[in-house]
Amino acid sequence: MDITILALESSCDDTSAAVLKNTVMLSNVIASQAVHIKYGGVIPELASRAHQQNIIPVVDAALKEAGITVDNIDAIAFTRGPGLLGSLLVGVSFAKGLAISHDIPLVEVNHLQGHILSHFIDLPDRQLPHPSFPFLCLLVSGGHSQIVLVKSPLEMEIVGTTIDDAAGEAFDKCAKVMGLPYPGGPVIDRLAKEGDPKAFRFAKPHVEGYDYSFSGLKTSFLYTLRDRVAEEPGFIENHRADLCASLQSTIIDILLAKLTKAAKEYKINDIAIAGGVSANSGLREAVTETGRRRGWRTFIPELKFTTDNAAMIGISGYYRYLDGDLSSLEVSPVARLEELNR
């Protein structure tokens, strides 16, 4: 029997709705919020207001694009967390209201697990490559940097995580001090292609196990700018491409060193990446090349599945629905991953 899922994502600054029939994505509509650009970061209150304005037209567009009505929906999957509490509240409240009014079951989804399971979304015209279980996933986004051992769609173990800043935060914070617009990651990626990745050397952390740290790299970058600007007032403008290339190369080296170590020690050759930073062209090329040298089967998500989107919530909700893992109407959103796992 076919299962049709309506999925909602509102964890940060993208309002998204998607419709999936089993694992096949029928629609995936996203409304982004440009209002945050001038502030250099996401303003939670503005984000939640924008979600309230966007969610009804986004859901309506997703249903129309999929060619169905609410009466055809078997379950509503929604992001419970982690994320911005006000933004999550909009999506959770809308999901509850729709579920009550149409007597549709609810399925709550961990946003981060949605990113990982985006590798199991299929398109109407083709099946995308899927990793085999167990596999390792490098999950990198603005707020999280993790290595996750994925044993099944419902069983995942975080084997390494950041102890301070995430990779995406390092990109954004370093971009800001160079006078680059928000979000900084895509801009650094573009400029890095014009620079020399060996022009500057920045500190790399020495953290035991598989955990990450990027605060030392960020500090090393800031000290380099401070010292060099004192010697050469136009230093940033004159060397921006080289700075971006060196910074990006260092972040990628840090990410891949731990991933390679985990793959070797867990004896796993199916390696995936996911999350917003997985859109970074340097990281995508580095993972592919490392996989070629080490005999990995690498899984690089299509760009449309790297950023926050409801299709990834839908695929996670699909597996939870099959397992009978339904949510109650008393459920509330949670901002932190630690609260979600309680």
Image: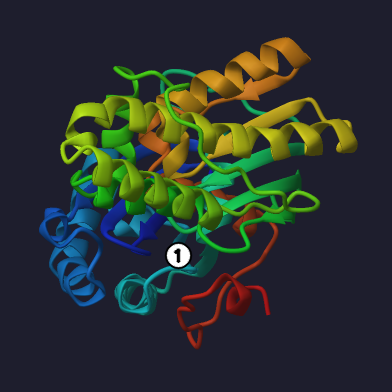
Q: Quadrant of residue 91?
A: bottom left
Label 1 neighbour load within 10 Å: few <14, some 14-19, many 20+: many
Q: How is the image coloured?
A: rainbow
Q: Position of residue 7 (x, y in %)?
A: 40, 56
Looking at the rendered structure, the number of numbered marks drawn on it comes to: 1
Q: Quadrant of residue 11?
A: bottom left
x 61%, y 38%: residue: 255
Q: Secondary structure beneath disc 1?
A: strand
Q: Nearer the viewer, residue 112 or 78?
A: 112
Q: Nearer the viewer, residue 312 or 14?
A: 14
| Horizontal side of residue 216 vs 268, given as left or right | left
Q: Nearer the viewer, residue 138 or 214?
A: 214
The C terminus lies in which quarter of the figure?
bottom right
x 56%, y 21%: residue: 286
Report whether residue 150 is seen: yes
Report whether residue 309 is seen: no
The N terminus lies in which quarter of the figure?
top right
Q: Amino acid at mark 1?
A: Thr
| Horizontal side of residue 217 vs 270, given as left or right | left
Q: Is residue 51 above or below residue 334?
A: above
x 68%, y 47%: residue: 147
Q: Is residue 2 above or below residue 270?
A: below
Q: Position of residue 280 (x, y in %)?
A: 41, 31
x 65%, y 33%: residue: 256
Residue named by callout 1 = 79
* Furthest-bottom residue in this view: 330
Q: Position of residue 327 (x, y in %)?
A: 56, 75
| Horizontal side of residue 93 vs 4, given as left or right | left
Q: Is residue 200 above or below residue 8?
A: above
Q: Position of residue 253 (x, y in %)?
A: 60, 32
